[in-house]
Image (cartoon, rainbow, N blue to C red):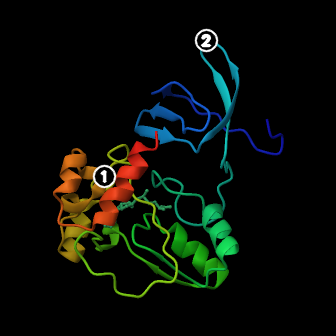
Amino acid sequence: MDVMKKNAEVIGRLRYPLAVGMPAYIQQPDGVLRTSSIVSVDERTGTHVRFETKNTNPDRGVGGKSNYRGNCSPRLIHDLIDQFGIQDISDYMCGSGTTEDVARQRGITSHCYDLNRGFDLLTMDIPERNNFIFWHPPYGDMVVYAGSQYSAKEVKEKYGIDPIKSDLSHMKDWGQFGTLPGRGAAISLAGLQSHEH
Ligand SMILES: C[S@@+](CC[C@H](N)C(=O)[O-])C[C@H]1O[C@@H](n2cnc3c(N)ncnc32)[C@H](O)[C@@H]1O
């Protein structure tokens, strides 16, 4: 156990048995919380389990919105910028805007879009040439975005597109991904993410 890491207590039912190297999936009243990969399982009782995960950031960092389900920690974007010396970053599923906020903090250029801002990665052209793309697609239907994390009606009124039709989190199954008039990469990347567990 790394004593420098802060602890986070989560109440919910484990959807699958815990396995080192895999994420934990914890059923919450409003969806499923997925952790990063488990490093060790340290203690089990009849009702509690204590385990350590790889990339736990209980204080999260500043940027994006922690209440936008499935958001990522701004610290992850900072790490990527440091690791790869990024000066220009693009994110086509930027959700609550974490990538954009961190890019602003770091004084680098960003190109950030999302269906919730009227940009559909499946059917619209990417407007710029990219230097570095950070891509964080939905977790299958585990967290539903259009109509749940944001108002689909407002997006329709503002941008004239119905986000529910191309929101990857609204796809019924992987077969439906396959029939989308979209980019093969989106399909295989989302598939990879789903098969990780
Ligand atoms: C896991 S979230 C990204 C979270 C983000 N990294 C953050 O920190 O807030 C996935 C995002 O994909 C978006 N999305 C789903 N289908 C999309 C599509 N066809 N085109 C663009 N964005 C899409 C959803 O609206 C959602 O915001």
Query: Which residue is denoted by mark 1 in the rendering?
Result: 169
Residue farthest toward the right in the current orientation of the protein: 3
Instruction: Give coordinates of residue 158: x percent, y percent.
Output: 24, 75
Instruction: Give coordinates of residue 6: x percent, y percent.
Output: 75, 43
Q: Answer left or right for 10 relative to 142.
A: right
Q: 61 or 22: which is nearer to us?
A: 22
Determine the secondary structure under disc 2. loop
Amino acid at pointer 1: Ser
Q: Would you say residue 152 is visible in this rendering? A: yes
**67 to 64, vertically: above or below:** above
Q: Would you say residue 149 is visible in this rendering? A: no
Label whose residue precedes the other's in the sequence (2 or 1): 2
Q: Answer left or right for 47 relative to 165.
A: right
Count neighbours of disc 1 (C-alpha within 10 A) and say few if under 14, some if 14 to 19, many if 20 or more: some
Q: How many marks?
A: 2
At a point 27% along the width and 54% down the height, the residue shown is 147
Count neighbours of disc 2 (C-alpha within 10 A) and say few if under 14, some if 14 to 19, many if 20 or more: few
Amino acid at pointer 2: Gly
At a point 57% along the width and 30% down the height, the residue shown is 19
Query: Which residue is denoted by mark 2 in the rendering?
Result: 46
Determine the secondary structure under disc 1. helix
Q: Which mark is residue 62?
A: none
**99 to 173, vertically: above or below:** below
The CA distance from mark 2 to mark 1 is 34 Å
Disc 1 residue lies near ligand 1 with CB under 8 A? yes
Instruction: Give coordinates of residue 156: x percent, y percent.
Output: 20, 68
